[in-house]
């Protein structure tokens, strides 16, 4: 099964920092989406060891080499469970 970034509010440029939709004026969560969805231009710019859920953990693929600024194919966002 493929994993894809969905059209959820977390990926929409209408999401404000207080988790309110700029278009609809209501509080939303990651499981919401709507027809006014507009994908953020950049989802995450800090894809490296220091922003990886596996960094310095038991599931890190390169524990002896991993360092801030390095990126590998096992990167996982910090809000994901490694």
Image (tube, rainbow, N blue to C red):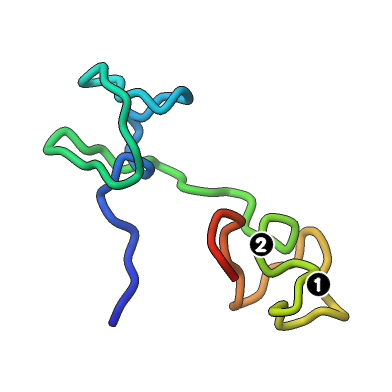
- What kind of element bears circle 1? loop
Work out which quarter of the rendered image holds the C terminus and state it.
bottom right
- What kind of element bears circle 2? loop
Alpha-carbon neighbours of circle 1 within 10 Å: few (<14), some, or many (≥20)? some
Against 52, residue 44 (above or below) is above
The reply to whether dot 2 and dot 1 touch (C-beta < 8 Å) is yes
Q: Residue at x 68, y 69 (%)?
A: 54
Q: Choose between 69 and 75: the one closer to the eye.
A: 75
Q: Residue at x 62, y 58 (%)?
A: 47
Residue at the spot of label 2: 52
Q: Is residue 82 left or right of residue 70?
A: left
Residue 66, label in figure: 1
Q: Is residue 28 left or right of residue 54?
A: left
Residue 42, label in figure: none
- Dividing the picture into quarters, in which one does residue 28 lie? top left
Residue 55 in the image: x percent, y percent? 74, 67
Q: Residue at x 34, y 59 (%)?
A: 5
Q: Is residue 16 left or right of residue 48?
A: left
Work out which quarter of the rendered image holds the N terminus and state it.
bottom left
Q: Residue at x 75, y 78 (%)?
A: 58
């Amino acid at each position: 099964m493929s994993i894809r970034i969905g059209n959820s509010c977390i990926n929409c440029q209408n999401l404000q920092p207080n988790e309110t939709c700029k278009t609809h004026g209501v509080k939303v969560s990651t499981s919401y989406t709507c027809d006014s969805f507009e994908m953020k231009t950049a989802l995450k710019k800090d894809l490296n060891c220091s922003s990886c859920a596996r960094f310095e953990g038991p599931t890190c693929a390169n524990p002896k080499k991993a360092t801030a600024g390095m990126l590998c194919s096992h990167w996982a966002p910090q809000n994901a469970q490694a």
